[in-house]
Image (cartoon, rainbow, N blue to C red):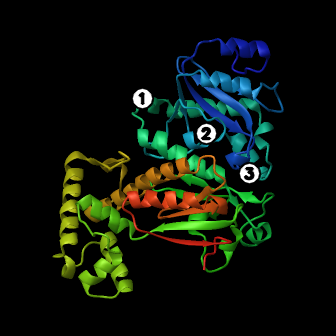
Amino acid sequence: MFWLVESKDQFDTFRNSGYKEVFVEIIPYSNAVHPCQNNVCSIYIRPLNCTKGYILPISHSETLSLDIDEVEEVLEKYEKIYVRDKKEFLHYFTLKTLFDTTLSQPTYIQEWTQTHTFYYSKYPHKKDLNRIIPITKHYEYCEKLYNDLKERFDVPINNFYNNYATVVFNAIERSGLRIDRPLFVSHFHNVDSDFVYTQYNFKTLTGRPSNKFGGVNYAALNKENGSREAIIPRNDFLFELDISAYHPTLLAKLVDYDFGDKDIHSAFAEMYKVDYKKAKELTFKQLYGGVFEQYKDLEFFKKVQVYTDELWANFQENGWIESPISGHQFIDENLEDMKPQKLLNYVLQNLETSTNVRILWEILKLLRGKNTKLILYTYDSFLLDVDKSEKEVIKDIMKVFKDNKLQIKYSYGSSYNFQ
């Protein structure tokens, strides 16, 4: 069978081939357009027991077009589908048999053909650019992609990231952020919609996600220049929950230290015999730079030192350690200039993210079928777009944090620029 499957007869033959395990890559209309606003140009399917892959065109200028619903029916029958990026793939097809092949380090970077690079450089704003790039070049790219990734198919896939992280971050991306368009344009870039979308990348060194799209870093919007006023509710108001003293809380759990019901920074202020603001500063300096000599005999920091020493000893002896909850492995050969305190910080960042994924999972379950949406997550804060008739769900969401023994504070308003 030829590699291009475009006619009904060719598709029927392909559909009845009995393949069970495949690698699939989606070729969208444009790689510069967010998947939430994109369409499928073509689909590359490489059965693992074949010597070549196949392109199934959905909408390309050089080919006939297949019905995307019929192609999805074929995809649903596969027992295993390996993909380059499951979170991205889920925007096009919400299938249960997906396995992300690029979860492990080192991070995979796509390599385009020279033709792709030329077109992407010459026509960066054309929203259906992949429809006019020669279909043979898409096939060339996909064949190389498969050959680059096939060695990863036998690597054990982290269940936590594959089945939970990909799903929650995909769900947040789908929600989108409503904007005041003129104000957004004045601070960022031109848009042709009242909604913008962000992308989360948790395939980072520590698993802590970055969060941006179209040159906008939504995890670090300026609090001083008014740019946050561009983010407005689609419902009635925006509501943000912030976790207080998150890393000290997580570290206390790791070392089995109980702060009780006290505000953690107040507890540290009593220990240090300083004011609240100074206590926060001293605590974070020690978390990320090591315990100061004058505080090393405090019980909390004694336990932190013991934990840090044990963590480092295991890392040096085994060449790796495994993070709680996520099962993410920090492997010595993949890391540079490691020191005990740096390793502890990596573990804390990973634990922060994996704890958040669990929280996000519960929040998204509570919001199923609701108008209220979870629209942004940044490290220790969670932004909701709230329908005031659904205020009760806010109480349920706050209980999720309480059940995880996390202290929270909240802000709300008619824009993201909370006063």
Three-letter code, disc 3: Ser
Image quarter (top left, top right, bottom left or bottom right) of the C terminus: bottom right
Numbered badge on residue 90: 2
| Residue 52: quadrant of the picture | top right
Q: Is residue 387 visible?
A: no
* Circle 1 residue: 154
Residue density around tag 3, few if under 14, some if 14–19, many if 20 or more, within 10 Å: few
Element assignment for label 1: helix
- Look at discs 2 and 3 and give the one toward the viewer: 2
User: In front here: 322 or 110?
Assistant: 322
Which mark is first along the chain, 1 or 3? Answer: 3
Q: CA distance from mark 3 to mark 1?
A: 36 Å
Q: Is residue 334 left or right of residue 356?
A: left
Residue displayed at 42% across by 42% down: 160
Q: What residue would you read off at disc 3? A: 121
328 to the left or right of 129: left
282 up-or-down from 182: above or below: below
